[in-house]
Structure formats: C-alpha cells, structure tokens
Image (cartoon, rainbow, N blue to C red):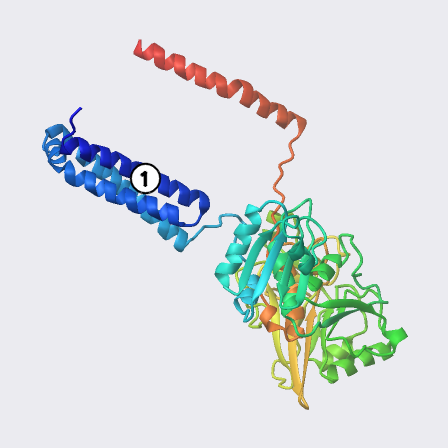
Amino acid sequence: MRWDRVEVGKFLGSIGVAMLVAGYLRYSIQSELLLMSKALLIAGGVFVVAGVVLGFSAIASFFSKRSSKLGTNTSILAIGVIAILVIANVLGYQHHKFFDLTTEKLYTLSDQTKKIVGGLKADITVVRFAKTPDAHFDELMTEYHTLNPHVRFQNVDPQEKPEVAKDYGAQHIGDVIVSAGEKKQTIPPSPDAPLSESDVTSAMLKLTQNKVKTVCFVAGHGEKGLADKQASGYSAVDDGLKKEGYSTKSINLVSQNEVPSDCDVLVIAGPTQAFFPQEVTMVGKYLDGGGKALLEVDPQTDPKLDDILQAWNVNQGKNVVVDASGVGRMFGTGPAVPLVVDYGDSPITKNLKGGMTFFPLARTESIADKNKTDVQDVELLKTSQQSFTIPNLQQKEVKFDPKTDTAGPLALGVAGDKKQDGKDARLVVIGDSDFAANQWAGLQHNGDLFFNTIDWLAQDENLISIRPKEATDRHLTLTESQSAGLRWVDLIFVPGLVIFSGIYIWWKRR
C-alpha cells in the first residue's frame, strides 16, 4: 500500500491522540507529572499538530460539505457546553459555596466556632488516626481550614506510620488529636455519632486558653445539682461549661466559711431553702471584692437574698409570670412557661435577638430604681404584652386582675455591673432556674443564654455566641391503625390509581 500525505497525517494524528491519552492516564494514576508523562504529552501534541498539517487538505474538503458543516456546528455547541461546565466546576472548586437548609443549620459552622477559629494566630493541627479516610472528617475540617488557614488536618494510618501515632499519643483507632505546639487534646471515637463541631471547637479552645477559670455552684439549699442527670438536673450545663474550657465544682458556704478565692464565677441555681445570714454576708463580701455571680431564684421560694438584691438595685417580684399569648402551645408548653423574644442591650443577649428562650415557672426580676447610678444595670429578658403576673399557682382560675396583677411586658432578668475602687463586680439575676435544666437547656436559645451569662461574668466576652446545635429527633410515631392505613395506601391505592390511569388513557386513545 502506497501512503500519501493524507494517510501519513491520519497515522500520525492517531498515534498523537493515543500518546496524549496515555500521558493523561499516567498523570491521573500517579497524581504527579513525571518525566514519562511529560514526554508522552509533548510527543502526542507534536504528532497531532503534524497530522493536522499533513492532512489539512482532506480536513478542509471534509468541512466544506453541508453535512459536515451541520455536524461541526453541533460539535462546537457540544464543546461549548462542556467548556462552560468545566469552567463552572473549576470556579466552584476554587470558590466553593454550599447552602445549609437544615432547621438547626447543622452543616454550617456556628457563631462560636467562627469567633474562636477566626481569631487563631498560631497553627493548630487536627490528625485523625484510622486505616481509611473519613469523608465527614475531611468536609468538616475543610470548613475550618477555609475559615482560618492556621487550621491544618490530615488522616494517618497508625499501622503504616506508628511513629506518628506514638508522637501524638494516639491510643485507639479513630482517635482525633488536636495539637498546638506541645499541647494536645484527644477526642476519642464515638460508635454512635460522627465527630462533632462542638468537640473540635472545644478542643481548640482548651489549647488556646492561658488560664482555666472555675465556676463554683453553691450547694446546701436545694440548688440544682451538677451531677444530676434527671430532667431537673444541671449535668448538661456542667458538660457544656467544661467544653467551653471552664472548671466546675460544688461548694458549701457553711463548711468553707467563705467563697473560695479560686471561684471566678459563683452560681446559685434555684435554692429552695433559706440562706443563713452569715452566708448572705459571704456572698455580699465576695461581690464587694470584685466577684461575679449568677442568682437564679424560682417563684414561690424565699432564699433570703434580699440584702444582695437591694444592694444591686434589683426588685424581685413575689409572683408567677403567666404567658397568655398561646405561642407556647407550638412547643408543647403552657401559659406557665413564658416565652421571651425581646432582649435588653447587653453582650449576654446581643446574639439572641430574633431567637426564643423559655422560662418554665418564672418570677419577675426588674430594676428597682432606674435613676440609681452606682450600678449599671440592664433588664435582659422581656415577656410579651400578653403576659401578666399572678400571686401564685394555687388559685383555681388564672386570669388577669388589674387590682393585684401587673400586665406585660415583664422583666425576668437583670444584669448589673458595679465598678468601684478599681474592681469590676458583676451580678446577673434571673427569676427562674429551670430554663437551664437538662430538660430545657437544649430548647431554642436557653443554653446559649446560660453560657453567655457565664462568659460575661467571667469576662470572656470573646466566647459569647450561638453554639453548635444538635439534630432534632424527628422520628414519627404512628398508631397501629395509622400504620395499617399507610400500608393500604402504599400497597393498594397508589398502584391501583396508576393502573386505572393507564387503562383510562388507553381506552380514550383506542
């Protein structure tokens, strides 16, 4: 067979295309542009150009035909669409953006994480020790890295690199270790849940703190217990404070005869019994010395803390607040659980605006004298206009009596700041302790209110934020009759409707 220029061009072009494909495949497999891959790509390009030059006359003749022109137009259009898709994907990869449509914004980094991670000035490395990579870990840590390049992460197989596992102190498969210099925090694997944002952010927070502050909870008067895991307990609060880098402990003022000097914040959460006069004096002395305290006093109790409240310009109502708006029914609550959406101008509540907090069985806490200047105080929480006070819950019919009751909006909390002799004392009083109990802390912004209050009192304003949310359990429980009805619809009604529609359409077109 005698080859002319066109045949040689076709041969060189075919060889060139094959070499280009081979070079690209080698590069894709090796993830690195080595010498052989470069040689194949360059040679392939040369051969393709040579083929085009030698076979140019045949190519020109082919494209002069009408059918070829139509095919060329179609090809160009297809290539244009592919090019647009490629460019869109490249731009999407370089400037990625996603939309989180979940109610709790589970796949969006929380305000707390953005504040903590965004403020990092030194490198933090997050290493996951496992045999295989984890897509959830990679996606989560990519978000952290995008937020701040100081955050780096990697997956390490401890069997392939035992020296790395030993250096980091990994003990189990699945351990995630967060390190900053020589300091390390280990997040053990959980068989029930993937790595959470709150765990990672908490570990980073602990690594970057210079001092661990202590939150002391007063005990001995029926207060909420840190170890109590029941619905009315404060074990969730205890866990949350530790995640934010605080140390917690219970104290007894009578046995210790003072507020311990290592208490950065003092919490009195729902006492049901009266304090001794000497205990009230201890708390007052602690505040006068620049201390910080949170008092949560439930209605229909009298812990005898009036001296402290009067010194801080707080008027504590002897009442129970009722919310007649009916909004609580959407959340399964009644009128004895006031809803708050109106917040005072304070760092504690600045991130809560637009959100809801609930206060099961609350009393009013308001500013006693608004002309008093020795205390800078703010009414933090305001109920709706449909709320009002009642003397107690013993009355048979709950209705507003203008002679004895007060109509809303009503204040349920006050934050005070007193500066004197170079000391900055702070006090927050809330007329309810159950809002932060295990049963209620996870509802809307109840937990955020409690933790923001502690952050403000501890002068850790950088931690005040909206925290990561957990997924809401939306399992639907059906009765036996409802289940049977759904099975009837699924197995009989829907297939029957499709079959009937098909027969009807066939009959009409017959």
Q: Report whether 388 appears left or right of 115.
A: right
Residue to which mark 1 is pinned: 19
Q: Quadrant of residue 268?
A: bottom right
Residue 309 falls in image quadrant: bottom right
Q: Which residue lies furthest to the top in this view?
A: 510
Measured as percent of width and height from the top left, residue 360 is found at: 69, 57
Is 140 situated above or below 253?
above
> Residue flagged by tag 1: what amino acid is it?
Met
Residue found 59% across the figure and 68% down from its top: 464
* Relative depth, front residue between 146 and 123: 123
Side (left or right) of 268 relative to 75: right
Q: Position of residue 72 (x, y in %)?
A: 18, 35
Vertical placement of 235 versus 332: above or below?
below
Give x and y (percent) for residue 335. 66, 54
Q: Is 479 in front, or is 470? A: 470
The quadrant of the image that shows the N terminus is top left
Q: Can residue 199 be seen in this view?
A: yes
The C terminus sits in image quarter: top left
Q: Is residue 337 visible?
A: no
Q: Which residue lies furthest to the bottom in this view?
A: 421
Mark 1, Cα crowd under 10 Å, few <14 / some 14-19 / many 20+, is many
x 49%, y 18%: residue: 495
264 up-or-down from 141: above or below: below
Q: For this rendering, which residue is in front, 9 or 454?
A: 9
**Residue 193 percent coordinates (x, y):** 65, 46
Residue drawn at 26 percent across, 44 percent down: 45
Kindly state the secondary structure of the residue where label 1 is placed.
helix
Q: Camera-side residue: 276 or 209?
A: 209
The number of numbered badges drawn on the structure is 1
In this view, which residue lies farthest toward the front? 2
